[in-house]
Amino acid sequence: MAPMRAFEEQENEILDAVARVLKSGMWVYANEGKAFEDEFAKYMGCDRTVAVSCGTDSLILSLMALGVGPGDEVITPAYSFFASASVIKHVGATPVFCDIDEKTFNIDPEAVKAAITPKTVGIIPVHLYGLPADMKSLREIADKNGLFLLEDACQAVGARINGKAVGTFGDLAGFSFYPTKNLSACGEGGCISGKNAEALEIASKIRLHGETKRYYHSLLGLNARLEEIQSAILRIKLKKLPEWTARRQEIAGMYTDAWADLPMRVPYVPDGFEHVFHLYVIKSRDRERLREYLNEKKIGNGVYYPVILPGLEIFRELGYNPGEFPVSEHCCREVLALPIFPQMTEGEIEAVIQAVYDFHGSKGL
Ligand SMILES: Cc1ncc(COP(=O)(O)O)c(C=O)c1O
């Protein structure tokens, strides 16, 4: 529903752009892709970005460009979307999981320090739900130990710390433009940014089979280009992103004000941090009953995430045991995402606020 409403808001402009691209005969990464990269870099306040096929590929290409491979360990949170860890396995390295901070849902720098071994080469902080991770502490840890930082900014386009955009802190950073994301394609899409210009250049080559000139390949790469139709659509949507982000923040503010006194935890935003509310996630001890109640009232909701990453079958070989990541495990039992997207009507926002109130037996609006 949310992606469709965003499309409808710019329907004519998007359809015109799609027709323009189709008629140009240039359908895979070309002028639209390059223009999008420049415009996205300008939006973030950095020199360069590299458009790719999806967020997962943005992280895989980044790890490849940073030279990560078998024998290397990369630290990542125990609580995130699967791709924050699977990409490490994809390049033949070993994910090392860390618990998260219970207020921010982001990787706990103290846990990161404890997880470093002689094999550790880097850290993947995830800006979960749209709130930046503690990049200052993580940068200190990374520099002290000679590690790279690869930001998983897939949920956090536009989020900032003291005015500085996520995607500009790490050696490299990956973004996703999946249809439900704050900046979304009408299909798959992703992008890489970061401070390490050399690695960015390598990533741009890996995106097209490591080609230096046509049919001459200097690196082992992939085919991970962004399509021109998606680039053209992203350029149109990028213009709206500041307005849409402000609206998400406004809706989040309404929820938080209305529910501050209810027996559930509303999102915490540290001073100087700008949360872009890709998801508005509360924590409730009564989560299952709240879910049932919201389902009855036809209010959308979702559990991101019901299981910690080290608990997944695919990572069983790493030998983690239940109880090793208590904060993450606790979050799996209590988190609930409530509807948030810029095109929500006042009536829809009020219905969400009222339903959560009514569930708690409070007096309502
Ligand atoms: C935290 C995180 N990392 C990585 C990804 C992967 O992005 P994509 O679906 O575009 O491949 C996602 C997508 O949901 C995500 O939420």
Image (cartoon, rainbow, N blue to C red):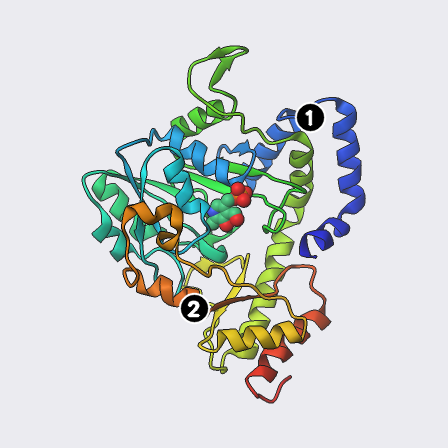
How many neighbours does mark 1 have within 10 angstroms: few (below 14), some (14-19), or many (20 or more)?
some
The reply, left or right, for residue 83 in relation to residue 327 is right
**Position of 257 relative to 304 (above/below):** below
The reply, left or right, for residue 343 in relation to residue 194 is right
Name the quarter where the C terminus is drawn. bottom right
Task: Name the residue that disc number 2 marks.
Answer: 333
Q: At x 45% / y 28%, what residue is drawn?
A: 203
Q: At x 50% / y 78%, what residue is drawn?
A: 260
Residue 253 showing in the rendered view: yes
Report which quarter residue 341 is drawn in. bottom right
Mark 2 or 1: the one toward you: 2
What's the amino acid at mark 1? Trp
Residue 315: x and y, percent?
35, 47
**Position of 163 relative to 17 (above/below):** below
Task: Name the residue that disc number 1 marks.
Answer: 27
Name the quarter where the N terminus is drawn. bottom right
Residue 343: x and y, percent?
70, 59
**Position of 364 relative to 295 (above/below):** below
Whichever of labels 2 and 1 marks the residue nearer the N terminus, that label is 1
Q: At x 25% / y 47%, what residue is drawn?
A: 141
